[in-house]
Amino acid sequence: MIIFAIAMIFASTGAFMYLFRALASIFLGQLPDRFKDIKEVPLTMLIPMIIMMIGMLLIGVVPGVVMKPLTTALRAVGYNVNIASWTSLEGALKNSTIDLTLVFLIFLGGFVISAIMYILGNKSETVPQEDNYTGGEYPEEWGVNADRFNYSYSFYQPFKEMFEPLLEKISIDEFFASIGRNFEYMSATVQGLFRRGEGAVLLFSIGVLLLILGGWII
């Protein structure tokens, strides 16, 4: 299972990074000037979001709300599936049970500890956001305007620098460009056959071969 474990680590890391970029773009970084006068949505739009949020939390903490009916339906059609309990999930591997309520309590405990540290800590002072994490420098000096002064700007630059030695030897752009050129060549060849009338004969021959092959398999 080592190969699968390595693949899962890379896949989960990549999934987290592209999802976290959306979070960083929306909630982190300097607020663009064009958004400073935007007000909160009315209550009629907040209520559906709150209901969906409660539903997601409930499913995350008590997955049996959804999994129990699903397992019942799958068993009815012959699949042998099971969940450990209303709050736990049981995987296909041996002893691979996870208690999501325990996971939720761990996150909740971390949140409570952070809140206590914030309340008991030194008195906070509100400052402009650019004074908080630019070390007194101005973004204009970097050639970055206010709209791009955000945590999502050059978000993947560290990863680019990490894999730059590999990317110097392997060009992803050239790889996809070569695939595109091959498809263009194939499409031009097929198009030329149809223009000369040979395409119909070719398709007819392929159809006959498929019928013969299908009849032989059956």
Image: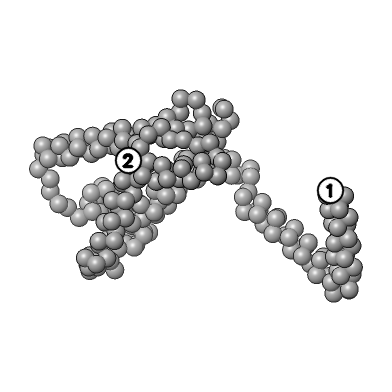
Q: Quick one: 163 or 18, which is closer to the camera?
A: 18
Q: Is residue 102 above or below residue 41?
A: above
Q: Amino acid at mark 1?
A: Ile
Q: Quadrant of residue 100?
A: top left
Q: Quick one: 37 or 203, which is closer to the camera?
A: 203
Q: How is the image coloured?
A: one colour
Residue drawn at 56 percent across, 32 percent down: 4
Q: Nearer the viewer, mark 1 or mark 2?
A: 1
Q: Alpha-carbon distance for marks 1 and 2?
A: 51 Å
In the rendering, which numbered label is found on residue 13? none
Q: Position of residue 184 (x, y in %)?
A: 74, 63
Residue drawn at 29 percent across, 68 percent down: 34
30 horizontally vs 186: left or right: left
Mark 2 lies on residue: 61
Residue drawn at 31 percent across, 32 percent down: 102
Q: Amino acid at mark 2?
A: Val
Q: Earlier in the sequence, mark 1 or mark 2?
A: 2
Q: Position of residue 144 (x, y in %)?
A: 36, 59
Q: Can residue 106 be seen by looking at this rendering?
A: yes
180 horizontally vs 54: left or right: right
Q: Is residue 136 above or below residue 109?
A: below
Q: Is residue 3 above or below residue 186?
A: above
Mark 1 lies on residue: 217
Q: Position of residue 127 (x, y in %)?
A: 17, 52
Q: Is residue 26 above or below residue 3?
A: below
Q: Are marks 1 and 2 in contact (CB under 8 Å)?
A: no
Q: Position of residue 97 (x, y in %)?
A: 42, 29
Q: How many marks?
A: 2
Q: Quick one: 96 or 25, which is closer to the camera?
A: 96
